[in-house]
């Protein structure tokens, strides 16, 4: 039960930070924003861990961290172009994409996954106005959803048998390294508002969030984790309406409803009809 509650807190934070990040990256370059954000996360995790990662933790964390960095880059750049609501809902497709990518490791694709995929595609068309209405930001966030799904799959496959905190620290380190390689040249002092967004996302949406996710996924399955994380687009949608003042037309609202139904319905079906295999705790 503690894993569920903590992951729900993580998704609420992630949902709220869509608004926070969009406001920040309209004032500050994307790569330096991500560089400082993950450097703070790395510093916090280093204080928590207080030891170097083992060779396995380093290998696994670096590989998974590279995927995570690519996902965050695609999402953050996409968020500068598309709306908060679209970004949150499209990112949530990682839930449906997770079992599709799990097929790469031999896992079967269930009938409800295909149904949810079709429903979510219909929702995506209505939300964005179809292929002609989908802008570059929407496409980048869709790529982010694929990368986040891959991150969950790899974390579920590789995190059992490793220590959660050092693995999360290594992921933060890999993200910092990659963003520093591209962002240092445009680094400058952020404003107070941008600093607030950096600190909140660095501490709570990165360091603590990925430590909790890594720790939880060592004890519960990737699919069950995906169900809990499926609440993120709902939180993002609420934040878009309440904090960003976004309004949806009838067609967009129908698309948003279909996406949420596909995401949550898929994971409810997974829990009902597919036994969850618990990995051994480290």
Image (cartoon, rainbow, N blue to C red):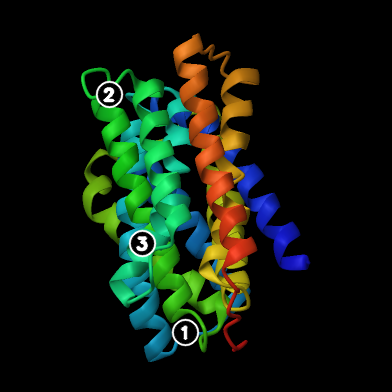
Q: Which one is in front in this view, the residue at disc 1 or the one at disc 2? A: 2
The one of 67 and 35 positioned closer to us in this rendering:
67
Mark 1 and mark 3: span between their CA atoms? 26 Å
Q: Please tell me whether mark 1 sits on a helix, a strand or a loop.
A: loop
Query: Tags 1 and 2 in contact by the CB under 8 Å rule?
Result: no
Image location (x, y in percent) of residue 9: 70, 51
Mark 3 and mark 2: span between their CA atoms? 23 Å
Marking on residue 134: 2
Q: Which one is in front in this view, the residue at disc 1 or the one at disc 3? A: 3
> In which quarter of the view is residue 32 placed?
top left
- Image point 53% across, 54% down: which residue? 206
Q: Is residue 16 above or below residue 273?
A: above
Q: Is residue 43 above or below residue 60?
A: above
Q: Quadrant of the C terminus?
A: bottom right
Q: Please tell me whether mark 3 sits on a helix, a strand or a loop.
A: helix
The one of 220 and 271 positioned closer to us in this rendering:
271
Q: Is residue 173 visible?
A: yes
Q: Earlier in the sequence, mark 1 or mark 3?
A: 1
Q: Mark 1 highlights which residue?
A: 52
Mark 1 and mark 2: span between their CA atoms? 44 Å
Marking on residue 150: 3
Q: Is residue 241 above or below residue 4?
A: above
- Image point 43% across, 89% down: which residue? 54
> In which quarter of the view is residue 219 placed?
bottom right
Marking on residue 162: none
């Amino acid at each position: 039960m503690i894993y569920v509650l903590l992951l729900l807190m993580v998704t609420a934070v992630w949902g709220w930070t869509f608004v926070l990040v969009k406001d920040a990256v309209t004032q500050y370059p994307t790569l330096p924003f991500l560089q400082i954000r993950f450097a703070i996360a790395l510093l916090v995790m280093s204080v928590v861990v207080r030891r170097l990662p083992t060779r396995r933790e380093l290998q696994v964390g670096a590989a998974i961290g590279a995927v995570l960095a690519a996902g965050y880059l695609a999402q953050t750049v996409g968020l500068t172009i598309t709306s908060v609501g679209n970004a949150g809902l499209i990112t949530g497709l990682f839930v449906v994409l997770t079992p599709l990518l799990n097929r790469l490791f031999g896992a079967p694709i269930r009938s409800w996954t295909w149904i949810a995929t079709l429903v979510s595609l219909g929702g995506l068309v209505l939300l964005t106005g179809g292929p002609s209405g989908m802008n570059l930001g929407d496409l980048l966030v869709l790529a982010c959803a694929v990368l986040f799904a891959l991150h969950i799959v790899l974390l579920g496959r590789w995190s059992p048998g490793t220590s959660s905190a050092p693995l999360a620290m290594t992921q933060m380190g890999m993200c910092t390294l990659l963003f520093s390689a591209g962002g240092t040249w445009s680094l400058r002092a952020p404003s107070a508002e941008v600093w607030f967004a950096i600190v909140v996302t660095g501490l709570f949406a990165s360091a603590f969030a990925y430590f909790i996710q890594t720790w939880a996924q060592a004890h519960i399955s990737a699919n069950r984790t995906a169900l809990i994380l499926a609440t993120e687009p709902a939180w993002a949608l609420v934040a878009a309406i309440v904090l960003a003042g976004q309004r949806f037309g009838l067609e967009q609202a129908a698309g948003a409803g279909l996406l949420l139904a596909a995401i949550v319905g898929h994971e409810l079906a997974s829990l009902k009809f597919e036994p969850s295999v618990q990995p051994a705790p480290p």
